[in-house]
Structures are given as C-alpha cells and as structure tokens.
Image (cartoon, rainbow, N blue to C red):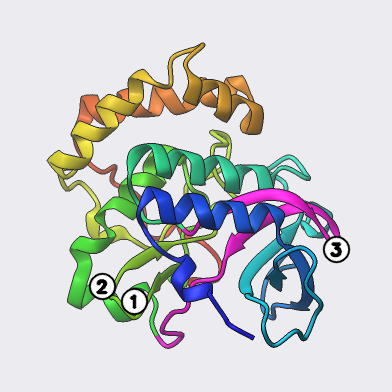
C-alpha cells in the first residue's frame, strides 16, 4: 500500500492543512506500542475512510498517538492535560512560524482521546548531542520556543533530523505550566541574544495573545486562560531581556537526557 507519510511532512500551509485533515479524519488501521516512553505512546497507521486494513491500493500515513488515558500521573502537571498541551504548542508554533513541529490534532483513537501527530521519517542515530556541533544555529528557534512555552522536558532525542536536513521539534506535553521547573539539554544558548528575526515575529504574535484575540481564545480552550496570561507575560519578559535565560545545567535538566 502507498505510504504517504514522508510526503505528508510538507511545510507549506496547503500541505500542512491537507495533513491535518488526514490526521483528523482517516481511520486507525493498526497501532503498536512505542517502546521506551514514560507514558503510553503508540505508533498508529491511518488509512482513508472506507478502505480495508491490508488494502494494497490504499494510502496510509504513520502517526504517534498519545492517549490521555495512558498518561502517567505527575506531581507538577494536572493529570489528563498533556495531549492538549501538545496541541497548544503546535498551534503556537504555527502562529510563530517556528520551530518546525509535525502536524498534530487531538481526536478519538483506539484508546480514547489523545494527540495524533504525524510520524517524521528521521535519522534514528541522531539527537541534539550528535547534531549540535554541525548545526547549532538550527536549534536556536527550538531553544527560544522552549523559553516561551516553559518547556519542562527538552531532551536530546526530542529533536529529529529528516532526509532534507530539517530539524523537527517534538514532545511538547510538559509545557505552559509556570509551576513546573524548566528542563532542557540546550545550555549552549545560555545568555546569548535571541535571533532578531525570531524576536520580530514574537513581537507580532504577542499582540495575538491579548484577551479576546483569536490565538488567545484558541489556546485558552486547550490550556486555560490563566496559562495564556502567563504565556503573554513570558513573551513580554523575553522581548524586554532580548536574551536566552541562564539556566543551571545541574538543576534545569530533564531525565533521561535523551
């Protein structure tokens, strides 16, 4: 059967809209448990409605499915909210235009509601630590985004490099909670100035975070109005400082690193 997963990873608005439609409406025709995750994570196969599993003529895409019911209870995040935080991060990345994040929807799946994100074909031997010496600048938008969303889980393996050498940022479930500790492996950016082009775009999107604006309403339906207000406050602080914060590599680290 034709695998259109790689083609679905297009980066134009039209391509991404088509992929979001597939993620939201195509049928699950098989899932398998993804090893190594702290929560239940599945690799899912989607096919167009009306096609039969195993139909050699049917298109298919592969996805990462994270059901809410499979979340492990955490001390610093409300239970059952991680899949919607994933979607909120994707919505914000789309508004900003950075970092590059795989298309993602929240929908019903075989184990209930969860996030369904396009699987990115990538070099499985690469992670942040193996790539940073060759292309550190490509991670600047990821590190800046993590400050904005207050990411508590930027591991070395949560950035993927595809065959076109594009860097994709994934795993944004532990975000937007100001009471969580920010955790990252990207300490190379400590104290550096934010890139000016990213700063300019942040200033534009900051206006869309105001109460009543479309982006604020969309995010508020996913993470709550109070967390949208915190997001706007962090954006203001980033614009005022103009620099990445200085984090402690002994304290602000995820576990495991990759």
Q: Residue at x 36, y 58 (%)?
A: 11
CA gap, disc 2 and disc 3: 38 Å
Q: Residue at x 43, y 15 (%)?
A: 210
Disc 2 target residue: 132
Label 3: few (<14), some or many (≥20) within 10 Å?
Answer: some
Which region shows up in magenta?
102-125
Residue 114 included in the magenta stretch of the image: yes
Label 2: few (<14), some or many (≥20) within 10 Å?
Answer: some
Q: Nearer the viewer, residue 165 or 69?
A: 165
User: Helix, strand or loop at disc 2?
Assistant: helix
CA gap, disc 2 and disc 1: 6 Å
Q: Are marks 2 and 1 in contact (CB under 8 Å)?
A: yes
Label 1: few (<14), some or many (≥20) within 10 Å?
Answer: some
Q: Are marks 1 and 3 in contact (CB under 8 Å)?
A: no
Spot occupied by residue 23 in the image (x, y as percentages of width and height)? 63, 57
CA gap, disc 1 and disc 3: 35 Å
User: Helix, strand or loop at disc 3?
Assistant: loop
Q: Residue at x 42, y 88 (%)?
A: 125
Disc 1 target residue: 129
Disc 3 target residue: 110
């Amino acid at each position: 059967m034709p695998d259109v997963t790689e083609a679905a990873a297009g980066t134009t608005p039209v391509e991404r809209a088509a992929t979001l439609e597939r993620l939201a409406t195509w049928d699950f025709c098989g899932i398998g448990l993804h090893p190594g995750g702290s929560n239940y994570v599945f690799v899912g196969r989607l096919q167009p409605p009306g096609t039969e599993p195993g139909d050699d003529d049917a298109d298919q895409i592969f996805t990462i499915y994270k059901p809410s019911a499979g979340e492990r209870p955490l001390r610093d995040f409300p239970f059952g909210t991680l899949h919607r935080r994933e979607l909120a991060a994707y919505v914000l990345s789309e508004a900003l235009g950075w970092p590059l994040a795989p298309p993602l929807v929240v929908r019903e799946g075989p184990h209930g509601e969860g996030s369904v994100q396009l699987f990115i074909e990538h070099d499985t031997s690469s992670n942040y630590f193996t790539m940073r010496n060759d292309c550190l600048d490509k991670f600047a938008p990821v590190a800046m985004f993590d400050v904005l969303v207050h990411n508590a889980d930027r591991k070395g393996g949560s950035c993927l490099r595809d065959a076109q050498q594009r860097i994709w940022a994934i795993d944004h479930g532990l975000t937007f909670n100001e009471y969580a500790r920010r955790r990252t492996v990207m300490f190379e950016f400590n104290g550096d100035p934010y890139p000016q082009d990213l700063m300019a775009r942040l200033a534009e999107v900051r206006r869309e975070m105001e109460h009543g604006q479309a982006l604020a309403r969309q995010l508020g339906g996913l993470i709550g109005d109070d967390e949208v207000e915190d997001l706007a406050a962090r954006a203001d602080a980033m614009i005022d400082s103009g620099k990445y914060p200085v984090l402690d590599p002994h304290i602000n680290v995820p576990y495991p690193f990759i």
